[in-house]
Image: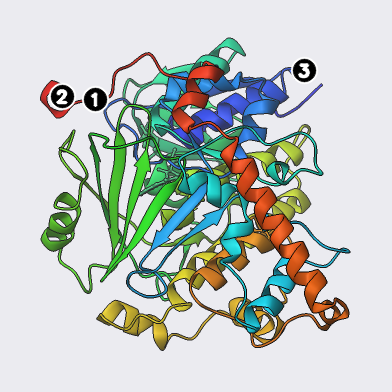
Amino acid sequence: MTSISKVCILGGGTAGWMSAAALSNKFNNLDLEITLIESDEIGTIGVGEATLPHIRYFNQTLGINEPEFMKSTEATFKLGIQFCDWGRRGDHYIHPFGEYGQPIDELDFHQFWLRLNQSGRAPRLSDYSYPVLAAEKGRFRIPDEDITRIGSNFGYAYQFDASLYARFLRNHSELNGTKRIEGRVIDVELDGETGNVRSVTLESGARIEADLFVDCSGFRGLLIEQALQTGYDDWSQWLPCNRAIAVPCESRGELLPYTRATARTAGWQWRIPLQHRTGNGHVYWNEFVSDDEAAHQLMTSLEGPALAEPKQLFFKTGRRNKFWNRNVVAIGLSAGFLEPLESTSIHLIQEGITALVELFPTTEINPLDIAEYNTHMALNFERVRDFLLLHYVATQRDDSEMWRFFRSMELPQSLQEKIAAWSSRGYLLKYEFGVFLPPSWIAVMLGQNLLPEGYDPRVDRYADGDLVREMERVRLETEAAVRNTPTQSEFLTRYGATSDSRPLSASLT
Ligand SMILES: Cc1cc2nc3c(=O)[nH]c(=O)nc-3n(C[C@H](O)[C@H](O)[C@H](O)COP(=O)(O)OP(=O)(O)OC[C@H]3O[C@@H](n4cnc5c(N)ncnc54)[C@H](O)[C@@H]3O)c2cc1C
């Protein structure tokens, strides 16, 4: 018998429906009443489109059929992100979801590459990466199950319409018993003794009580901030971009299995290909570019006609001082925001949900669980912040005021230590809880020309000829595996994941 019997989720964006889908699925053995409130009038942010590979596990544990989900959300496969103009203007590299080569005698492959590179004989490290080569050629297939093969050591994510994903999850949640209420919350009642949220009142006058509230109300943070005044840890000193303009456009060319992020003079621009359209956006720092100029840069660089009016968004990077405060757990934009450079927002929602499921208070809310949840989520946000910041500081650019700002910035100690360890001999200090594993750090550091001075001395045990032969064998094996891979469009059709809609055309919208 549980004493936490009523859960109220406030908000029906990606965060709200992901939370509802997970809680209604994981706790269908408990006598739990789950209610989700959303306001059609307020609507959702409706931007999120690119994700990280972990979302596959989220879907799998809900029993979601992959082709069906992809059809419903206009999804494409994502093998990584291509970064253009970040290290220097004209540079480009792909941060893949996967390893470079395979360890040799338990030593990291990149250490062998560093040695070869010092003698000027190494091709790109990317030439040993199956997902980079496949992405560059517009190809895709599911990873090989045989882990000895080069085509097995990568992951993949999706690019999809987050609003359609929320709708898809709504079906799941409602089938599992979640009750949806449409309406605007206009009042929040706190318990005079405990300070907990006792109930919310809708415009209609309806009053919803619950034992536990999940605040998915977006940037407003209606419960966590407006009602409980939890406070916000502002990280603008490190990640100062504070605005974005987003617009979808008609797609041109083949369907690429990767997201693109192109550095600009005062921010960066995204390109995300979906099945029926391409998503675009310009994230920028308004200190150094006006809204009009930012919009102009975006609109004049679209590959096809725009499909909607550009949408302006405002944000402040950072996180709530507590993610779980009293009987309110904040998930999604109400918990904090880090710019979408590495597609981490939906992932952080997933982290928040997973931690809540693990620590779910069945009998009473325990301060130890709250503390554990807050520590876990704080570390997750911090690790992501450091990784995003790496893109801005590992650069040789100084061609605008924004880039010069980053050159003289004092880094968080955690990032400073990571860069120092890498710069001496290519060692990666491992972070507890970090979502980005060593290959991701290697991709960005080398992609942005941050080369270590040395390498792991154990690599010198190998004779020169043996090393060159082994490296060439791996390169050829990678190349051959990619040759046998279908294009993404072929694969989507074969997989039964092609949506039934036609590519959108500006004249029809
Ligand atoms: C510029 C930009 C680009 C992004 N790109 C990506 C990306 O590529 N990948 C990624 O993972 N994430 C991305 N994100 C983040 C992503 O959009 C969000 O993380 C995600 O959509 C979750 O939003 P949410 O559900 O927290 O909030 P919202 O979508 O804002 O939903 C809030 C909900 O609360 C409801 N609500 C609010 N107030 C009330 C009220 N008073 N009464 C009743 N209901 C209320 C609303 O109706 C709505 O249903 C991006 C965000 C921005 C700003």
Q: Amino acid at mark 3?
A: Asn
Q: Amino acid at mark 1?
A: Leu
Q: Nearer the viewer, residue 191 or 335?
A: 335
Question: Does 434 sit left or right of 390 as displayed?
Answer: right
Horizontal side, residue 392 vs residue 245: left or right? right
Q: Residue at x 17, y 35 (%)?
A: 308
Q: Quadrant of residue 123?
A: bottom right
Distance from label 2 to label 3 (Cα)?
45 Å
Residue 29 circle label: 3
Badge 3 element? loop
Answer with mark 2 or mark 3, whichever residue precedes in sequence. Answer: 3
Residue found 72% across the figure and 46% down from its top: 150
Secondary structure type for disc 2: loop
Q: Amino acid at mark 2?
A: Thr
Q: Is residue 14 visible?
A: yes
- Give yes or no for contact between labels 2 and 1 (Cβ–Cβ under 8 Å): yes
Is residue 290 positioned above or below 102 on the image?
Answer: below
Judging by the rendered image, the residue that carries numbered circle 2 is 509
Neighbour tally class for label 1: few under 14, some 14-19, many 20 plus, Cα within 10 Å: some
* Residue 228 visible, this orientation: no
Rate crowding at label 3 as few (under 14), some (14 to 19) or many (20 or more) other CA atoms within 10 Å. Answer: few
Q: Which mark is residue 504?
A: 1
Q: Quadrant of ligand 1?
A: top left
Task: Give the label on residue 352, or none.
Answer: none
Q: CA distance from mark 1 to mark 3?
A: 43 Å
Which callout, 2 or 3, points to the residue nearer the camera?
2
